[in-house]
Amino acid sequence: KHAFDLKKTELRNKKSAAIDEAKLLFESSNKLTHLLEKLDSDDATIAELIKQVEKLERENERLSSENDRLSEQRDILLERFARWQHNLQKMDGVDLNKLAISIDSGLPSKNRG
């Protein structure tokens, strides 16, 4: 029983160390090279690396989706700006240079009091 308990403790410690090592691999500066050098057949290390990869894939998917949404929003705003600019050029008495100066001057400060 004592030998069994010792082996169980040893395996737990090995798994915990492998998980910590895998986490450190992802936090190091030269991640991929370091990861490939340290990769062995330890199941706990591989399992932790798979978890990290899945986490990064989810994060990548979220950021990609957000990037697509922001790109669409930017395109809509650029189209609106071009339409406004075109319509202003057609108006009589509108000086685009004066308009640009007044627009670029910024918003008035809030009166907090």
Image: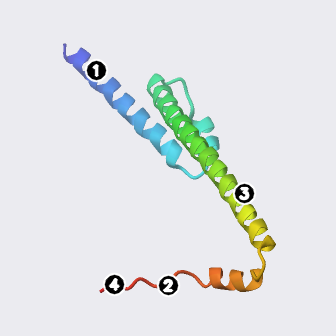
Q: CA distance from mark 3 to mark 4?
A: 35 Å
Q: What color scheme is it?
A: rainbow
Q: Which comes sooner in the sequence, label 3 or label 1?
A: 1
Q: CA distance from mark 4 to mark 2?
A: 12 Å
The residue wearing badge 1 is 8
Q: CA distance from mark 3 to mark 1?
A: 66 Å
Label of residue 112 in the image: 4
Q: Which comes sooner in the sequence, label 2 or label 1?
A: 1
Q: CA distance from mark 2 to mark 1?
A: 70 Å
The residue wearing badge 3 is 79
* Image-quadrant location for residue 111: bottom left
Q: Which comes sooner in the sequence, label 3 or label 4?
A: 3
Residue 59 is situated, as x and y percent measured from the top left of the image, at 52, 41
Answer yes or no: do the residues labelled 3 and 4 have beta carbons within 8 Å? no
Q: Which comes sooner in the sequence, label 3 or label 2?
A: 3
Answer yes or no: do the residues labelled 3 and 1 have beta carbons within 8 Å? no
The residue wearing badge 2 is 108
The residue shown at (64%, 44%) is 68
Mark 4, secondary structure of its residue: loop
What is the three-letter code of the residue carrying label 3? Glu
What is the three-letter code of the residue carrying label 4? Arg
The residue shown at (23%, 19%) is 5
- Can residue 34 be seen from the camera position used here? no
Residue 113 is situated, as x and y percent measured from the top left of the image, at 29, 86
Q: CA distance from mark 3 to mark 2?
A: 27 Å
Crowding at mark 4 (Cα within 10 Å: few <14, some 14-19, many 20+): few
* Image-quadrant location for residue 57: top right
